[in-house]
Image: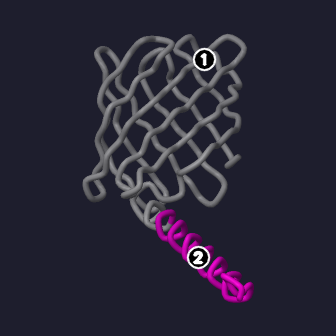
């Protein structure tokens, strides 16, 4: 007598596999239904940075976004560099409905501060502050394309970046 009938065993394995796939898709769907839907993953692209001395340079950027399991938290890492300029921006953001708030830091200049704004519908708009620095930051994700706009009165006057999902 066979311990396991091969067709019954195969059916049990397929059923378990379908169950795992459904569980993973439900988890991913939940995270993608929150205010940070569309941002999860690795991105890369190019753009320009306008500096306070009036010069504009081309920059290359990479970003990584991690949305937590509830879909209400986002961690961002954005690294950009040109021939003579770079910035490394990280943020940790929490949603309270459409309102968001959190902390951010820029490693190459050793500055950090707070941010607040709104998120939803593939768009994040925040005002970031630190001692002696303030900027408006807008991120838009649509499918596999993302745009980042930063406007400030500091050393960086403006940043415009277009990235695609890696």
Q: Foreground residue, 85 or 73? A: 73
Q: Which residue is mark 2?
A: 16
Give the main secondary structure, helix, strand or loop, of the magenta stretch: helix
Q: Position of residue 59 (x, y in %)?
A: 68, 26
> Measuring 35% from the left and 25% from the top, which residue is drawn there?
134
Q: Can you tell which mark lies on residue 157?
A: none
Q: CA distance from mark 2 to mark 1?
A: 48 Å
What span is colored magenta in the figure? Answer: 1-28
Residue 165: give x, y in percent of width and height. Answer: 67, 49
Residue at point 56% right, 11% down?
53
Return the disc, 2 or 1, that comes first in the chain's sequence. Answer: 2
- Whether residue 4 is situated above or below residue 92 in the rendered picture: below
Residue at x 47%, y 64% (from the top left corner): 27
Determine which residue is flagged by label 1.
86
Is 6 inside the magenta-drawn segment?
Answer: yes
Where disc 2 sits, the SS reads helix
Residue 14 sits above or below residue 92 on the image: below
* Mark 2 or mark 1, whichever is nearer to me: 2
- The residue positioned farthest toward the left in the image shown: 96
- Quarter occupied by residue 128: top left
Query: Pointers 2 and 1 in contact (CB under 8 A)?
Result: no
Q: How many marks?
A: 2
Picture residue at 59% right of the left edge, 27% below the top? 79
Instruction: Tell me the SS state at disc 1.
Output: strand
Crowd rating for badge 2 (residues with CA inside 10 Å; few <14, some 14–19, many 20+): few
Whole-percent x, y for residue 5 in the image: 70, 87
74 relative position to 46: left or right? left
Can you give x and y, in whole percent of width and height, for residue 4 in the image? 67, 83
Q: Could you tell whether 2 is left or right of 26 in the image?
A: right
Q: Residue 103 magenta-drawn?
A: no
Q: Give the vertical position of 26 relative to 152 (above or below).
A: below
């Amino acid at each position: 007598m066979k311990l396991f009938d091969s067709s019954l065993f195969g059916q049990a394995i397929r059923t378990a596999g379908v169950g795992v796939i459904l569980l993973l898709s439900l988890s991913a769907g939940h995270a993608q239904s929150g205010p940070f839907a569309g941002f999860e993953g690795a991105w890369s692209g190019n753009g320009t940075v306008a500096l306070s001395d009036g010069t504009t340079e081309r920059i290359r950027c990479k970003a990584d976004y991690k949305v937590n399991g509830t879909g209400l938290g986002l961690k961002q890492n954005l690294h950009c560099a040109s021939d003579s300029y770079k910035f490394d921006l990280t943020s940790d953001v929490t949603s309270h409905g459409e309102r968001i708030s959190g902390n951010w830091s820029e490693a190459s200049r050793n500055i950090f501060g707070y941010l607040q704004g709104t998120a939803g519908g593939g768009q994040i708009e925040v005002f970031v502050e630190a001692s002696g620095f303030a900027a408006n930051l807008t991120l838009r994700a649509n499918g596999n394309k993302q745009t980042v706009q930063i406007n400030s009165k500091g050393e960086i006057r403006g940043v415009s970046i277009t990235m695609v999902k890696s």
